[in-house]
Every structure is written in C-alpha cells, then in structure tokens.
Image (cartoon, rainbow, N blue to C red):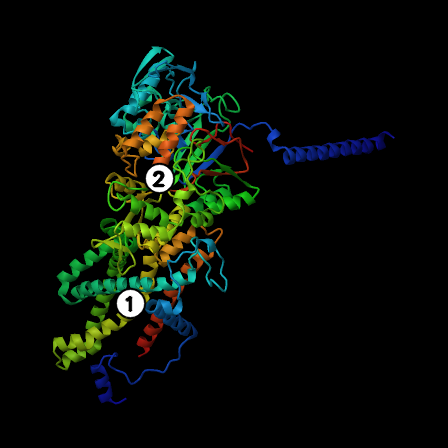
Amino acid sequence: MSDLEIQAGLGRSPRANRQHRPPRRFGVAEALAGLFTIFLVTAALFPALVAPGDPLGIDPLSAFQSPSPAHWFGTDESGRDIYTRVSHGTGSSLLIGTVATLIGLGLGLVLGTLAGMLGPIVDFTVNRFLEVLFAFPGLLLALLFILIFGPGVATATVAVGLATAPGYARIIRGQLLSVRSSAFVEAATVLGRSPGQILVRHILPNTLAPLFVLGTLGIGQAIVWASALSYLGLGAAPPAAEWGAMLSAGRTYIGSAWWMSFFPGLFIVLTAVSATALGRGIERRLRHA
Amino acid sequence: MHLSGYPHRASRTLTGLVGLVATGILLTGCTTAESPEATEPITGGTLTYASGDAEPTCLDPHVGGNYPQALVGSQYLESLVSRDADGAIIPWLADSWTESADGLAWDFTLAADVNFTDGTPLDAAAVQANIAHLQDPETGSSTGYLALAKVTGTEAVSANVVRLRLSEPDSALLESLSQPWLAIESPTALARSQDENCASPVGTGPFQVEKWVQQDSITLVRNENYNSPPEDAAHTGPAYLDSIVWRFIPDSASRYAALQSGDADVIDNAQPDTIVQAEASDTIVHLDAPRPGASNRIELNSGRAPFDDPLVREAFIRSANVDDAVTSLFQGTAERSYSALSSAEPLAVSAPDLFGYDPEAASDLLDSAGWTERDSGGYRVKDGERLTVEFPVSTNQSIPAEQSLFEQIQATAKETGFEVVLSPMDLSSWYTALGESNYDAVSAPYTKVGPDVLRILFHSDGITPAPSGYFANHAQVDDPAIDALLTQAGRVTDADTRAALYTDAQNTVLEGFYILPLFDQQNHYLLGSDVVGARALPTVSTPTFYDAWLK
C-alpha cells in the first residue's frame, strides 16, 4: 500500500471502504434461520397461504387431538387446529416484536444522540435518567406501564418498546462517542469537511449499521417479552391466536395435551433463535467489511 | 452334650424368631393390604390443603360471604344447624328448635357446655350478637345479610334459648342458618375491630386459626376442647389432625402436580382432565360434591340493551352450542344443565326444549327484533350500533374449562351475528364491573341451601345491592309475577304448595330467557390416598377434616 492509499484510507470510514469485503458462505445455522424467517414472514403477510383454516374456528367434538396428518400440531380444548393458530399468530407476534423494537430503537436513538452529541451537561442528565430506568428490570418497567395504561396488545407493545429503550440509548451513546473520536473522523475534520457533512457521511452510518444488528437481535427478545406479557394475561386476550396466550391456555392441560403449549413455545424459541442467528451473521459481516 | 446343647437351643430360638417375624410380616401385610379401613385412626400429623379459589380478603364469612370463605371457614366455624346426607336438617350448635304457630317466632335451644376457642361460652347472647353483626351495614355482609332478610329481631328467652322474630314466615330459615356464612362466632372476638376479626375469627370448630400469612397460607391448629360435632360426624372429642396448612395455588396444573408429588394432601377446583386422570390412578381419590343452589349459568342483563329485548335474549341462547362444548371440555365430569337450580336441589325444573342450539331460529329472532343488517365483520347491526355482548369473566371463579366454554359460545354466537367481548379479570375488577352494571352477560356461581336461592337471584329486590355493594340478581329480572310467586313460596310451610310455587317461578324465569344454563354446579376435590375420613358437609359441600386422619 502506498502512502497515498493509506492517506486515502484514513480519510474514508470503514463503512465507505467496500473493496476488501471477504467472500463468506452462509453457515448452516444462518441458512436454517433464514429459511425459518422466510416461512415466518410469509405466514405473517399471507397466513392463508401456509394455513388455510380459520384460527378461531371451533370444532368441540375433535378437541384434544394429538398431532396427526389431519392436524399437524394437534388441536386445543375447543378443537381449534394448533398449526393454523400458530401460523396465524405469526403476524401479530412479528408485528409486536418489530414495532416494539422500533419504539425502543427510536427512543434509544433520540436519548443516545442527545447524550452523545450535545455536550457534557445533557450527557450527564440523560445518563442519570438512564441509570434510574436501568434500576428497574425491563419486564418490571413493562408491567408498570401496563398497570397505568391497562392490558391489551397496543399497551403491551409500547411497554416492551419502552422497556428496551434504555439499553439501546446507552449503546448508541457509546457508539457515537467512539465514532466521534475515531481516526477517520479526525482525518475528515483535518481535511476540512464541515461538521454537518461529517455527521451525515461518517458518524451516523457507522452508528446506525450496528443498530441494524441490535434491532435484529432485539426483535427476538421483544417477541419473547411480548409473549411473556400475554402469558401473564396482560397482552392479547383469549381466544386470540397469539403465541404467549396460547402457551398460557395450554399450561392447564400440560399433563394431558403437551402439544397445546409445546408448539407455540417452539415457535417463540425458534423465532428468537433465528433472529439471533441472523443478527450475529450480519454483525460478523459488518465487522469484516 | 452340654456344650452341643447350646447351639441346638440357639438355632431353635433363632428358627422361632424367624418364624415369628415372618408371621408378623405376613400378618401386617394382610392387614394393610386387605382392610386399610380397619386400622384405628392415628392422632397427629399435618394435612396440606391447596385451594384453587381466590384467597379470601377476610377469614370471617360474615363479611361479604363467598365460597372461598366458606371453604376455609368450615374448619373453624360452626352453624346452629346442619344437614344430613338426605338433606334433612339436623342439630348442631342448636340442640332443638320450635316454630310458633304463626311462623313469626323461632326458639332455638343451644347445646350445653360449648365454648368458643377464646373461652367465651356459647349462649343466647352470643347468637344475638351474631345476628346483629350480620345485619349491621358496617359489617358489609351480602350472603348472610340476604339470607336473614326476614329476621327483624332477636331476644334471649333464657341463657340457652334464643328467639328469632320474623316479619313474615320463612320456609327457608333453617336452610339459611345451616350455611357457613351464618356461622356463630365468639361475641368477644366480634367486638374487636373488623380488621382483627378478619385476620383471626374465633368459633367453636374442631380447628382454630393460628396464623395467616397473606398470599401464602393459613395455619389451623386443633381445638383441644372441641365438643360440638354435628350429629352425622363419625366420632366425638377433638379432631385427629394436629393442624391443617391451607395453601393457595391458583394454577390448576401446579395444584394437581402438588397433589401428585405429595406437597398437598387435598386439592379443590380440580380440572376435568385431572379428574379423569385421578379416576384411573390408585393413589388419588376423587370426591364429587355438587353444590346446592344455582346451576352454572350465564345471566343475561335484561336491564339494558341489547338484552332488554326478550327476542334478542332468546336469539343469544339459541345461537350458543353448549351441548358439544360441555361434552368436549368436561369429559364426562359434568352434565349439561337446562335448569336454574343445581341438580342437588330436588325442586329443580329442567327444560331442555328451551335451550337447544338452533342457529336458524336465532337468526330469525334477530331479524324480527330489527337486527337485520350485518357489518364487514359479519356482526349484526341496528341503527348503526353493532350487536355487542360485554362479558366480564372472573378468572378466580371460573376454572379454565369454563373459560374455554365461554370462548366456544363466543365462536358459535358469532355465526349468528353476536360480538361477544370476553374480558378476563381478577375478582375485585369483576365485582367493580358488576357493581357499575357494566355487563351484558355474566357467569356468577351462587351457592345456597334450598330453592330459596331463586328469591335471591330473581326477585326484583335482588337488584338493590346488599351493604357489601354486591347484588345477586345479575339478570336484573324485574317481573311482578315472579316476585309474587317467590314471596309466596318463601312464606308457605306446606311442602306441596311450596313445590308448586317454586315450579311456577322457575318456569317463568326459564321461559323469559333470562339465563342460559350451562352445566351442573361442580365441586370436585382430589385427595391423596393417605387421607382417610375426609368428607364434604351436606350443607354447601365444603370439606370437613374433623374425622380425617393421615395414614
């Protein structure tokens, strides 16, 4: 590498440096996670495509049937098909997870940017505020919010978003601070770029890229939390086809009809694991880029 | 010879010993295996009871007066009279009683030498204090208060004879007095503050409250001086058990798991699937004890739209497929009911024809009631209003199978065009929703001994809240004809006339489509096979552990 190239490299952020990306193959885990995610997205957008039945349609006389070719995941206490319900529940679960994560990220971005960019006094204030929020475990924050605004899908979503915001804010603030003091930002300053240009061209892209990874990881967690709230009877109300609510309904019959709670539980776990595997994969690629 | 004699004698002794031991083992084996009941009751031990009902907020069943209070209260409180297995009233704290010729005065002679566990003697003044406590609005009684509606005053005829004065004859007085909500407590204890009395009520029962750790358990210990068992008890003197630990495990699967693991000896509110499992097992015993009083039913609020229109009420009832739901959910542990009363009531009128599933008839009824249009959701609409049924569900009072039953009714009623909004809530939010009349349909168990429960549930007086704020006429039935029948039935003492009046009243209620009967009032206890001698009291089927002991 010539001196000139080094200089050029210094002036450009890693994000803008695209020519040295090492070719990487998909790992088995990522491929499986990808396939499952494609299934989930399809089920969320076009539930009738993967499961044509009615998720609320009862058939009392075929209640408590174990998994069979007719009912892949068995039936529940009202004879509703569990596979249909799990598939139709994907939409609401993914929506809750995504919206909650967006709320968390959005709030985190505002608080983090305020703290990271506006000088020590704002930084100090925001940090103390975040520390107070951190003193409460996330789920407790969500429960407090629901206590005030009442149970339901909308409040549960906002509650989960709020509960995850402090974590995002702290990460974003740290990221902003480290990017701001990095060599390429200093170089850009030395090269005479305006502060606005530096923020848009260097600081934000390098802060937001890791956020994408965080968000992917966060969706998994948000779905688990939202399911936990529904399980406790604070989110979706029965007989809604929602994974947490289904898990809760199946709990009563766990001794005699394991499939009622196993399959919704399996989907919660697989979704969280898939989101994590994909998030980690994207993270690795970004680090190598 | 002498020397060799020792081993001989020793071996003979040994053989004898072995033989004895072997015989002993065989004998013990035989006794335990073949006739476990033949063994003498063992004194001692602690029985753990795990309840699925809500934890009471007050251990004195005079205050409010619900079934969870009756369950635990039956262990330390006793009533003036009881019932035997055939339903006949038998003496308990009262040895005998007489009714005046005009039916307006009842004299009760109290059992001699009975003391409350705080040492206060049971006398006429104690009974007077209890009636006064139940009727005092400050107490906030509902069940006891309503049962004593006709009692206008009391007097002590002598130290052990108390007289109740009535405003009109009350054919249900003895049945009312047999209930745990009208149990007799120590007047000394009642004189304390309500908070103190709620935490440790004092009675004459076989056990007494030792301590109550809220959200966890109540510890009851044996009353060593107990001498007032009801006539149908199996023994006299103090109870066998040292103590009872009364726990609260709301989750039905955890409760059954506690019984299986031996952490609990007795559980209540057993789910149908666990009852089926228990009946197949030889380590768990099923005790089926149907409650008297009302059947399990949905009451339709006729006091506001849309159920102020009898056509809409009938349409809702015809749109609900209850038969299939009961068959699938209760797995043979409960029968479909077509009656306002529990099958434990001999006067129950059953009308299967009125409550069959008929979606076409339901549709026609809605059409004639003016609910002709449907919106995009498929629900019926009239004047821009959707046909919505608000249905608050108490998660404490309804077992999961019952909540699933409501979901199935919701699904079948939707086909006809009803939007049933199920709102699961805890007991206090549920009481609030009822108090504000903010419901169209509700399912509330009501337990009372005898057909007089009809007066509580369907007389228009029942729309007015009791001092506790609770009112029992959730269907808000306000029909002078029904009022007249029930008032008359409550007055007459002639059995045939009484039966005819209650039959007429039930028919009028059923034909008015105020209620949708679901299934018989259920009460299932599961007991570990080491529990011997436990039974349900034939009054309101609460368990009693006075005769119980642990193997």
**Under tag 1, what secondary structure?**
helix
The vertical placement of B370 against B213, above or below, is: below
Indicate the quadrant where residue B482 lies.
top left
Instruction: Report the quarter where the N terminus of chain B lies.
Output: top right
Q: Is there one chain holding both mark 2 and mark 1?
A: no
Left-right relation of A58 to B386: right
Q: Nearer the viewer, mark 2 or mark 1?
A: 2
**Quadrant position of the C terminus of chain B in the picture:** top right
Secondary element at tag 2: helix
Report which residue position mark 2 lands on.
Answer: B511
Residue that protrudes farthest toward the top in the picture = B158
Q: Residues within 10 Å of mark 1 (few under 14, many from 20)?
A: many
From this view, report whether residue A14 is shown above or below residue B8.
Answer: below
Which residue type carries mark 2?
Glu
Q: Nearer the viewer, residue B213 or B9?
A: B213
Residue B99 or B309: which is nearer the viewer? B309
- Asked if disc 2 and disc 1 are in contact, CB closer than 8 Å, the reply is no
Q: Which residue is mark 1?
A: A215
Residue positioned 48% across, 41% down in the render? B263
- Residue at 30%, 25% (x, y): give it: B149
- Compare residues A95 and B469 and report the one nearer the observer: B469
Where is residue A50 drawn, in percent x and y? 39, 69
The amino acid on which the numbered mark 1 sits, given as a three-letter code, is: Gly
Q: How many labels, in total?
A: 2
Disc 2 from disc 1: Cα separation? 60 Å
Report in which chain the residue with disc 2 lies: B
- Which chain is home to disc 1? A
The percent coordinates of residue B339 (x first, y second) are 40, 38
